[in-house]
Image (cartoon, rainbow, N blue to C red):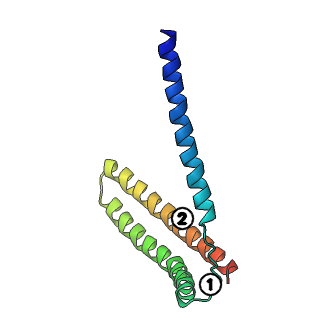
Amino acid sequence: MKEITKQIRKSSMLKLRKKLSVAICLACITIASATSVFADSVSDSKIAKGTEKLMADVTTWLMVLAPVAAGLLIIYFCIRRSAADEMDQKKWNNRIVVAIVSCIGAVLGSATLNLIIGYYK
């Protein structure tokens, strides 16, 4: 019985050594064949400049359109709430609150993104 366990340990140690040697060889090959990449011209490319301008324009428009859309939704929800019974009025009240919170979130998110983009100019 002891001989069998010794053989199992010996074979598992050999497998472990082989796997470890393969992993070390792969790591050495990966390190030796690594190429350096320089991305100096990416910030001056048309794609980067255009994307930067696009993000600035989108965030500016979002800060304008989010309150307008939320205001229209709130007006619609108030009209629907006035025509609803007691149980449905609670649902319309919840929808009004969600519209207000969503508007605040959209404006704050847009302003934050616009501020962050402003630091990279």
Instruction: Name the side, left or right, on which 61 lies relative to 34.
Output: left
**How dense is the environment of label 1, judged by Cα within 10 Å: few (below 14), some, or many (20 and up)?**
few
The residue located at (57%, 42%) in the rendering is 20
Of callouts 1 and 2, the N-terminal one: 1
Q: Nearer the viewer, residue 91 or 36?
A: 36
Amino acid type assigned to the residue bearing label 1 in the image: Ser
The residue located at (36%, 69%) in the rendering is 76
The residue located at (35%, 59%) in the rendering is 81
Q: Nearer the viewer, residue 96 or 83?
A: 96
Nearest to viewer (mark 1 / mark 2): 1
Label 2: state its secondary structure. Answer: helix
Which residue is tagged 1?
Answer: 43
Q: Which mark is residue 34?
A: none
Label 1: state its secondary structure. Answer: loop
Snapshot quadrant of residue 92: bottom left
In the figure, 26 relative to 17: above or below?
Answer: below
Whole-percent x, y for residue 45 in the image: 57, 89
The residue located at (54%, 47%) in the rendering is 22
Whole-percent x, y for residue 87 in the image: 32, 47
Whole-percent x, y for residue 37 in the image: 62, 76
Q: Nearer the viewer, residue 36 or 111?
A: 36
Which residue is tagged 2?
Answer: 105
Snapshot quadrant of residue 113: bottom right
Disc count in the image? 2
- Spatial CA distance of label 1 from label 2 is 30 Å
